[in-house]
Every structure is written in C-alpha cells, then in structure tokens.
Image: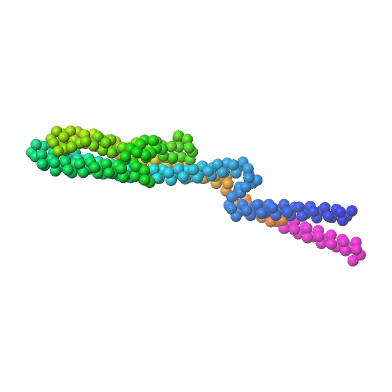
Amino acid sequence: MAIQINKSVGLGLNHQISERQKSLSKVHEKMATGKRINRAQDDAAGLAVAKLLESMSRGYKAASRNIGDAMSALNIGEGATQGISDMLNRMHELSIQASNDTLTNSDRQALNGEFQQLKQEIGRQTQTTQYNTQDLLSGEGPLSDGTGKFQVGPNASDPNQINVKGSNLSPEALGIMDLDISTRAGAASATSGIQQANKAVLDTRVNFGVQYNRLENAYNNNENMNVNNTAALALIESLDFAQASMDKARDDILNQSGIMALRNFQEISRNSMLSLLGN
C-alpha cells in the first residue's frame, strides 16, 4: 500500500514540474517576442482587438502613401499650369501688338506665326503632362476628367476618398483653337479670348492648390491617427517586462523546487525498495 501511495506522489510531482515548464516556456516566448499576446490562447479577446488595430494601422500607412502620390501628381499639374499661363500671357501680348494699325499685314503674319506656335505648344503640353502615364490636363482619364478619386483613408467608404477635380486645358477647352491674329479684327477677338483662357487656367491652378492643401491636412490626420492607433495596439499587445521577469523568477523557483522534491522522492523510494529487499 505504501508503494502505491509513493507512486501517486511521484506522478503528482511530475505533473507539477511539467506545468511549471510549460509556464516557463510561455514566459520565455513572450520575453523573446516582446508581446503579451502571441496566440489566441494567451488572450482571445485581446488578440481580436489587436489584429483589428494592426489592420487599421497598416491601412493608415497605405493611405498616407496614396496621399503622397496624389500630392506629387498635383504638384506636376500645378507646375504645368504656370507654363501654360506664361504662354497665354505672351499670346495676349502678341494680340495686343497685332491690334495696332501701325503694323502691316506682313507684320501681323510674323506675329501670328509665333502666336500659332504657342497655341500648338499648349496643346502638346496638355497631352504630355502626366503622372504615372495618366494625363493631368487633357480632360481625359481619371486624374483629369473629374471622375477620379484619391483614396486617403483606411476604409473603402466615401469619407475615405476625395474626388479629383477635372482639369482640361487643351486649346479646344480653353476656346483658343481658332484664334488668329493675322488681321486687326482677329487680333482684337484674340485679346478677349486669351483673357478668358487665362482665367480658366488660373481657376485650374487654384483648384490644384486647394486640393493639395486638403490632401496635406488629410496626410497629417492620417499620421496622427496611426500614431494613436499604434499606441493603443501597444497597450494591448506589448509585454510588461517587469511583470514577466517576476513571473519567470517565480516559475524558476517553483520548477527547481519541484525537481528537487522529485529527486528526494526518488531517492527515498529507492532506499525504501532496497529496505524491502533486505539490502
């Protein structure tokens, strides 16, 4: 009967040591990763919230990159409007000059040659001003025709998107395609037409500016949200190293005590068996 009791005590000690070693293994894993939650069994509810926060954080980072790309596109478009505005100002100057009757028809033809070249260059630039092969000033494509959207948040809903304003500065859209200053009447008409075109270019340039400022604020908000989101994630997921060190020290002591107790038990059991055998 004594031997049976001793056997059950030994099994109990083995079980306690096994449990302490499992506990130590978990503490070592947490200290190695720096995370309090490494699997669902550590904290199922905490893991669910942590994974949601992690997903949101990655969404904010991706949205911030999107905003950076959008701001780059707007910078390119706004820079091109400056060049187009300069050409229109020169065309306006030429039309004013051609309106003066001190000039001969031959003089006006010379002025009209430059005027037409500038008009063609405006058309060329509106077709070649692009970001990632997409037009910005031609009125074609999502970055120019008014149908595009900038994804500026971590979700797909409308509040996470900003509509891209249309921007068509082609000679046809500006109303300068048929302007000609080879005659006095044509020059007078061109003067008024160029003024209207310059206003349209200025409006587009302003649109680029206000969209850029809005995106800049959206970027700052995204970065703030990501910082706070990351802080919330850390509160849930990060390990308290002081507490973990205390847990490790406690489990080390209990584990060593269990091992010593088992060794003593085994030694006592061996001596008892030898006694029973008469040795």
Question: Is 277 placed left or right of 10 in the picture?
Answer: right
Residue occupying the point 25% across, 41% down: 85
- Visible in this render: residue 154? yes
Residue name at image x 82 percent, y 52 percent: 8
Image location (x, y in percent) of residue 252? 69, 56
Residue 231 is left or right of residue 70, and the answer is right
Residue 270 forms part of the magenta stretch: yes
Q: How far across and how far down the image is residue 193, in percent?
A: 21, 34
Q: Position of residue 93 (x, y in %)?
A: 17, 40
Here the colouring is rainbow
Q: Residue 216 at x, y = what percent?
A: 39, 42
Considering the whole magenta stretch, tell me its main secondary structure. Answer: helix
Relative depth, front residue between 139 and 243: 139
In which quadrant of the rendered view does residue 75 lie?
top left
Query: In the figure, residue 47 lies in which quadrant?
Result: top right
Q: Which residue lies furthest to the right in this view?
A: 278
Look at the image and say whether residue 3 sits in the magenta stretch.
Answer: no
Q: In which quarter of the image is the C terminus?
A: bottom right
Residues shaded magenta:
256-279
